[in-house]
Amino acid sequence: MLQVAILTILLYAFWVLMSGFFTPFLLAAGFGCALLVAWLAHRMEVVDREGHPFHLTWAALAYWPWLVKEILKSAIDVARVILDPALPATPTVVRFRPRQRSVVGLVTHANSITLTPGTLSIEVGRDEFMVHAFTREGAAATVDSDMDRRVERFEGSA
């Protein structure tokens, strides 16, 4: 039940931030909608440890800034390759075994790869990832990477 209460609060806070309306009626309507959505999610049995990974909140607050920094660094590298004819693109596909064991960890790792400019998760499985990269260096950087280790710590299996 605590997860439903937390979900209601988070949904309501998101609604208030996004709406920008602070009249009593609209605040009450927003709370009612958040409560209804949380109740429906509970009835559909999607409010669980995996569907609502509240236990990962502190780990996510440490991981996201690092990921944003990596996205920016990669965007600069991709722009450099595109703009400088002396640095040709060398599209490469690599396969590697991820360290993550949970579905949340695997999805976080695959999405982090895809969010990083110049890389794309093509196939994601428990035993193997297949990643396409814009350059050979970018492909090599995904195998046994810092991202893999950080996501492993994020999911709590390290």
Image (cartoon, rainbow, N blue to C red):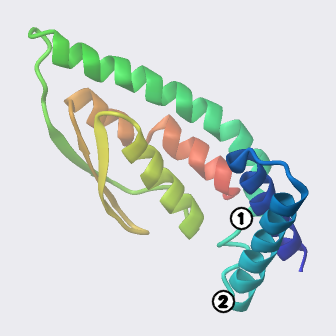
Q: Position of residue 30 (x, y in %)?
A: 78, 64
From the viewer's side, name the closer residue of 140 and 155: 155
Q: Which residue is found at the position 40% from the left and 37% from the top? A: 116
What type is the residue that disc 1 sits on? Answer: Pro
| Residue 158 appears in view | no
Which image quadrant: the N terminus? Answer: bottom right
Taking the image as shown, residue 106 lies to the left or right of residue 2, namely left
For the residues labelled 1 and 2, say whether their Cβ atoms are less than 8 Å apart.
no
With 79 as the anchor, is 116 left or right in this view?
right
Tag on residue 131?
A: none
- Residue 52, image x and y in percent? 71, 68
Q: Read off the residue under disc 2.
A: 44
| Residue at x-position 35% and y-position 62% | 128
Residue 69 picture location, percent across and down = 54, 25
Q: How many marks?
A: 2
- Name the image quarter holding residue 74: top left
Q: Which residue is mark 1?
A: 53
